Image: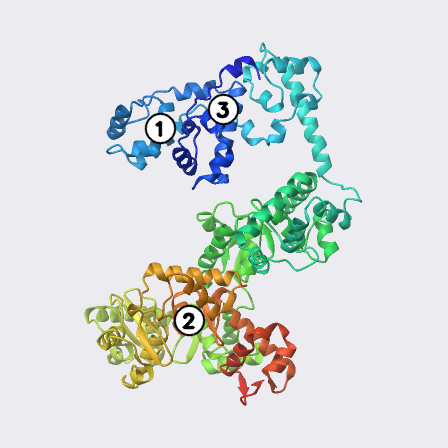
């Protein structure tokens, strides 16, 4: 460091002027640290020992201080000092801010930055928005400086000039100017290397040439043809595991899946009886040791993966890795194409993310947002949709989504087909295996509308089993189809002319419904028009899509202004009159036959009710559950399920709930199951098992059980099913009850067979 540069370091510089984060400012205020000198004099252990002052906060402040000291030592802080002396007069136009500055004696930018925000906010009229606006103006009007010291890694900035193979006289002249390493040389003023400067243009060319040669040598080591010995998997495995300690080595092999199935942090936490935070901290230490001991190997792997991501436009699935690369060698030697992807995701957790069996550069949060956005954007009624238009719509919500990743999500997550259209290029359309596409083909083959029952039999004849309820749900959800009777379905394209007339009639019906509130039966309203059954149901279809009215089923509609149905209002009045739970079976017997089915469905599905015990029903309002407590309950149960592969016995969830203030003497497994089923994203299975709904555990169990029944081709018991499918052993009680409720399975009480 030169004498001139050293003399300019002022350790009494206000530490708040270093642009600390909120936690850093709060920690400094708590410890009474106001200057750089006070921070440097405080041991890190004393800082971390205080409540609210973490190691991460200390590291962030330390980096800010080191950056400031580095630029100061290199003689480049003069611009910063001049900038801090700028007056605030030209930056402030707020009278309240001017009064606050006058009261506190703040006249310059440096004084403003050194003043705690809380002190300014305590002044009358000075608000958070005013403080942020002034900060933004200060940043926008700062003099720009070269960003080399921030962009280059510290190991390069610390590189001694002698390692650059520069001429000895040039190194001596650089040292006279206070530059002993590359970082200090980059911090020298630009005028030093101009014609007539202290060093001149020849010195700049010499340094630039040495750096270019250094980079070329490094790239040659990483680039194309690796040595044959390096491509040997045992050698690579030794380079990865040898630098690690035994505990770290075991953790790496388990998380990445080297020689064994991969495991998650949550799974390891349960197995080792530790919390997930401890396992994550050990993983961070393992990752840091790998970067310290095997930097060249990790650099090579990272370089190869970057090329693969560039080749496949942002997504790598492991099946098409370039031969001759380390990634290809790792996957081929282990017969596991996903192993190199998991390894890169572990070593570089902020650059690569392994999800849905592919490696991407999109974070998990953005990946979930991408899937959800595409589900909303690529709805069936919009297909076929050009990929360019779809990408443009996604870009308005999520920036930087690679095209390859977009196509992958469309194909794999949404199960759409990508086709080439002569006019519009690549388009996303429904897969030929989608239920709606198959139903459309069945109707086109018949060339006439079909009864729902006929569609079920035609489907089973060609595509194996299906339930009438599942087909009807698909028909109602897809606008390609239209109901022309209570049980008869047709293609909407066959009724375009009739739909135009139906739209006019539906508008008139909607007007009459809005003029006379209450429930209206559409067929009765159209009796005077003498229209056919097909036209009546086409009118009903138009009314279902009219936001002014609400379709109630069975041809009934009412104004959409009603907050809830009259049946639900009457139910609430009855329960308030009862003042507690009632017998459900007796309550249903007292209902009129016309609305008994609707009342039964409301009692079993509506969130306003809860079943506290067998054959009892009550209002949820009679239990101590506000919106905040319900959210906490769902969060607690979700945490239990996440630590146990997504499912657990409801009794285990009860134990966790009772550990906090959410439980009570009134809480039992029946009530807990009801709350989870009605209010959360959970699936309640027979046998007292609760699972996350996105896991689709019930469907998976039925699929495995049906496969066992199909393979047996004769009645078999649950024990025989478990003998064929050992992975279902823990669900024996659940499988028996699921099979008894399956309409496609026949049972004599002990054995089951597919119909």
Q: Are marks 1 and 3 in contact (CB under 8 Å)?
A: no
Instruction: Identify the residue at image location x=53%, y=24%.
Output: 70
Q: Residue at x 65, y 55 (%)?
A: 254
Mark 1 sits on what residue?
Answer: 115
Query: Distance of mark 1 from mark 2, alpha carbons?
Result: 54 Å
- The local secondary structure at tag 3 comes to loop
N-terminal-most mark, 1 or 3: 1
Residue 742 badge: none
The crowd level at tag 2 (other Cα within 10 Å; few <14, some 14-19, many 20+) is: many
Which secondary structure lies at badge 2?
A: helix
Residue shown at the point (24%, 80%) measured from the top left: 528
Residue 109 placed where, x, y %?
Answer: 37, 24
Task: Return the residue at label 3.
Answer: 145
Q: Furthest-top residue in view?
A: 196
From this viewpoint, is residue 554 visible? no
Vertical order, 431 against 33 (above or below) = below
Could you say where residue 502 lies in the image, as x and y percent from the top left? Answer: 32, 71
Q: Residue furthest left?
A: 515
Query: Which numbered disc flags the more N-terminal residue, 1 or 2?
Result: 1
Q: Is residue 358 above or below residue 59?
A: below
Q: Is residue 399 left or right of residue 171?
A: left
Q: Is residue 226 above or below residue 738?
A: above
Can you tell which of label 1 and label 3 is closer to the viewer?
A: 1
Is disc 1 in contact with disc 2, using a CB cutoff of under 8 Å?
no
**Place of residue 588 in the rendered image (x, y in percent of width and height, measured from the top left):** 31, 83
Q: Tell me which numbered mark, 2 or 3, is placed earlier along the sequence.
A: 3
Q: Label 2, label 3: how many angstroms apart (C-alpha)? A: 61 Å
Q: Is residue 2 left or right of residue 562?
A: right
Residue 673, disc: 2
Residue most extreme to the right: 228
Q: Residue 283, percent across and down? A: 60, 48
């Amino acid at each position: 460091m030169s004498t001139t540069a050293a003399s300019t370091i002022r350790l009494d510089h206000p530490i708040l002027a270093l642009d600390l984060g909120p936690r850093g400012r709060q920690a400094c205020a708590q410890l009474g640290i106001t200057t750089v000198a006070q921070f440097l004099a405080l041991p890190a252990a004393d800082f971390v020992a205080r409540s609210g002052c973490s190691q991460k906060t200390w590291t962030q402040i330390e980096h800010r201080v080191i950056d400031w000291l580095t630029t100061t030592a290199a003689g480049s802080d003069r611009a910063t000092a001049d900038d801090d002396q700028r007056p605030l007069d030209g930056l402030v136009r707020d009278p309240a801010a001017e009064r606050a500055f006058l009261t506190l004696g703040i006249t310059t930018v440096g004084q403003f930055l050194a003043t705690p925000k809380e002190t300014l906010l305590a002044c009358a009229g000075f608000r958070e928005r005013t403080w942020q606006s002034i900060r933004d103006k200060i940043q926008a009007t700062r003099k720009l400086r070269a960003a080399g010291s921030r962009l280059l890694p510290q190991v390069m900035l610390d590189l001694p000039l002698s390692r650059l193979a520069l001429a000895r006289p040039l190194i001596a002249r650089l040292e006279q100017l206070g530059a002993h390493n590359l970082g200090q040389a980059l911090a020298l003023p630009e005028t030093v290397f101009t014609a007539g400067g202290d060093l001149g243009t020849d010195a700049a060319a010499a340094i630039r040439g040495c750096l270019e040669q250094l980079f070329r040598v490094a790239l040659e080591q990483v680039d194309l043809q690796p040595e044959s010995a390096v491509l040997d998997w045992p050698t690579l495995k030794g380079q990865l595991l040898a630098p690690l300690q035994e505990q770290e080595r075991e953790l790496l092999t388990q998380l990445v899946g080297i020689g064994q199935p991969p495991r998650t942090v949550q799974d390891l936490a349960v197995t080792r009886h530790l919390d997930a935070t401890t396992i994550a901290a050990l993983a961070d230490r393992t990752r840091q040791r790998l970067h310290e001991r095997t930097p060249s190997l990790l650099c090579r792997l990272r370089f190869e993966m970057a090329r693969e991501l560039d080749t496949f436009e942002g997504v790598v699935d492991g099946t098409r890795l370039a031969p001759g690369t380390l990634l290809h060698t790792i996957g081929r030697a282990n017969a596991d194409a996903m192993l190199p992807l998991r390894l890169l995701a572990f070593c570089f957790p902020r650059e690569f993310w392994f999800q849905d069996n592919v490696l991407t550069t999109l974070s998990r949060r953005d990946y979930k947002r991408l899937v959800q956005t595409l589900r909303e954007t690529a709805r069936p009624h919009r297909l076929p949709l050009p990929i360019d238009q779809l990408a443009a719509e996604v870009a308005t919500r999520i920036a930087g989504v690679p095209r390859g990743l977009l196509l992958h999500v469309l194909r794999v997550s949404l199960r759409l087909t990508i086709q080439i259209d002569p006019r519009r290029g690549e388009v996303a359309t429904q897969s030929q295996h989608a239920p709606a596409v198959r139903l459309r083909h069945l109707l086109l083959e018949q060339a006439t509308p079909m009864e729902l029952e006929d569609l079920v039999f035609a489907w089973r004849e060609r595509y194996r089993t299906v339930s009438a309820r599942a087909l009807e749900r698909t028909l109602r959800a897809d606008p390609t189809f239209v109901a022309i009777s209570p049980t008869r379905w047709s293609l909407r394209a066959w009724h375009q002319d009739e739909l135009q007339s139906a739209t006019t009639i539906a508008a008139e019906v909607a007007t009459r419904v809005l003029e006379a509130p209450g429930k209206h039966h559409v067929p009765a309203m159209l009796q005077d028009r003498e229209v056919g059954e097909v036209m009546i149901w086409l009118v009903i279809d138009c009314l279902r899509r009219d936001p002014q009215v609400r379709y109630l089923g069975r041809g009934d509609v009412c104004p959409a202004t009603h907050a809830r149905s009259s049946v639900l209002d009457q139910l609430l009045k009855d329960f308030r009159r009862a003042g507690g739970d009632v017998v459900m079976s007796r309550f249903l017997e007292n209902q009129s036959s016309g609305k008994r089915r609707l009342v039964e469905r409301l009692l079993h599905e509506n969130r306003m009710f809860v079943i506290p015990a067998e054959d009892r029903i009550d209002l949820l309002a009679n239990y101590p559950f506000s919106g905040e407590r319900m959210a906490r309950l769902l969060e607690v149960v979700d945490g239990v399920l996440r630590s146990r592969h997504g499912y657990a016995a409801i009794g285990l969830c009860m134990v966790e709930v009772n550990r906090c203030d959410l439980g009570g003497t009134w809480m039992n497994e029946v009530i807990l199951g009801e709350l989870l089923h009605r209010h959360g994203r959970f699936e309640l299975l027979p046998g007292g098992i609760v699972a996350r709904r996105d896991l689709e555990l019930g469907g998976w169990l039925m699929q495995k059980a049906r496969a066992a029944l199909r393979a047996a081709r004769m009645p078999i018991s649950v024990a025989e099913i478990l003998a064929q499918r050992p992975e279902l052993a823990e669900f024996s009680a659940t499988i028996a009850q699921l099979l008894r409720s399956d309409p496609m399975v026949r049972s004599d009480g002990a054995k089951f067979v597919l119909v």
